[in-house]
Image: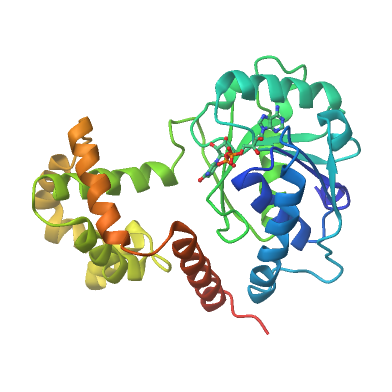
Amino acid sequence: MQGLLGRPVAVVGLGQIGMSWAACFLARGLAVAATDVDPLAEHRARAYVAKAWPQLEAMGLVVPGADPDRFTFHSSIPDAVSGCGLVQENGPEVLSMKVALLEQIDAATAPDVLIASSTSALAMSDMQVRCQYPGRCFTAHPFNPPHLIPLVELVGGRATDPGSIAIAHEFYTAIGRKPVRLHREVYGHVANRLQNALFNEAARLVLEGVTTVEDIETAVNWGPGMRWPFVGPFINFHMAGGAQGMAGTFAKFGAEEATSTDRVARIQLSAEQRASLIEGVAHCQGARSVEELETMRDRMLVALYRLKHPVG
Ligand SMILES: NC(=O)c1ccc[n+]([C@@H]2O[C@H](COP(=O)([O-])OP(=O)(O)OC[C@H]3O[C@@H](n4cnc5c(N)ncnc54)[C@H](O)[C@@H]3O)[C@@H](O)[C@H]2O)c1
């Protein structure tokens, strides 16, 4: 793994996720060689990194010697991946495109180069099918924006060598990420499944007229969301169980909770229901632009990260 930290990282696809990964790798002192089919991508990415740098500094994530100018842009995949130790693929979420991208990356790299895909919902088993050396291909799914949110979900496909995942786990940990491992592929990995379970229930509560989009946002932000930066669902119930911990929670609420969670199931949204939720969101958003919301989110993520990892 040490070797990986001394070699450039190639970033293939410089959209929302690729640009943020680039900022993250650069801050950890790595050189980044990037490529994208969009000729405007280089300019966009350089501006993104410049904006992300002070955030990364505020989080204490910029290591001595790190330099945003260690970013190079290449017009082809073979040029970008030449000499790198790991490729982070962030192309569009379309299976045929992922298969083609991985095939090209595989053909252009030595067999010991790791190939990670940021895919949110595609299976690596389906993506690695045309690779000559599929054992080094795995999913490393970040949360948007990857430079501010440390989680990376690691999962291999049918042909992935478990050794590649082990090296990837060390690598992402070494660059300040928080990797988790999935022992098998499941749709949506883990964190988005949790997020979607909450969304489904939120949508149901609004559509059934129980409350509004705005009050759901308030309930999450000022209720359970206050705990989530520090405790997940298990430790939360462990703490709720008093001296007996989780066992106490099951004893106190077990039967009732089992029934209530059964009632919280997936919902299918009709076009009319979607329109009604979209209208609720527009009302909740008010005059704030998405950019303003992103700026607020990023400011809070930096502050929260510092609270959890004090620097200086
Ligand atoms: N946006 C998110 O919230 C999010 C979160 C986690 C993971 N992901 C995953 O990350 C990946 C990228 O998502 P995104 O939101 O950044 O998408 P995006 O559309 O913003 O970026 C995709 C980029 O790939 C480029 N591209 C297209 N074809 C290419 C090719 N042949 N070679 C090189 N570049 C090419 C596009 O020009 C574009 O810049 C997807 O797999 C997505 O599922 C997205």
Q: Nearer the viewer, residue 114 or 96?
A: 96
The answer to whether residue 174 is seen in the rendering is: no
The answer to whether residue 4 is seen in the rendering is: yes
Horizontal side, residue 33 vs residue 53: left or right: right
In which quadrant of the rendered view does residue 87 lie? top right
**At 66% across and 38% down in the image, what residue appears?**
165
Give the image location of residue 135, x and y in percent.
71, 25
Horizontal side, residue 189 vs residue 240: left or right: right
**At 69% across and 44% down in the image, what residue appears?**
168
Quarter in which the C terminus is drawn: bottom right
Horizontal side, residue 258 vs residue 229: left or right: left
Q: Nearer the viewer, residue 190 or 268?
A: 268
Give the image location of residue 274, x and y in percent.
24, 38
Residue positioned most to the right: 83
Give the image location of residue 149, x and y in percent.
55, 58
**At 13% across and 61% down in the image, what residue appears?**
252
Q: Nearer the viewer, residue 96 or 64?
A: 96
Up the image or down, 130 lies above or below 114; here it is: above
Up the image or down, 208 lies above or below 135; here it is: below
Give the image location of residue 94, x and y in percent.
55, 25
In which quadrant of the rendered view does residue 108 lie? top right
Horizontal side, residue 285 vs residue 173: left or right: left
**At 53% across and 51% down in the image, what residue appears?**
144
Up the image or down, 197 lies above or below 216; here it is: above
Count all numbered tags in the image, as a single digit.
0
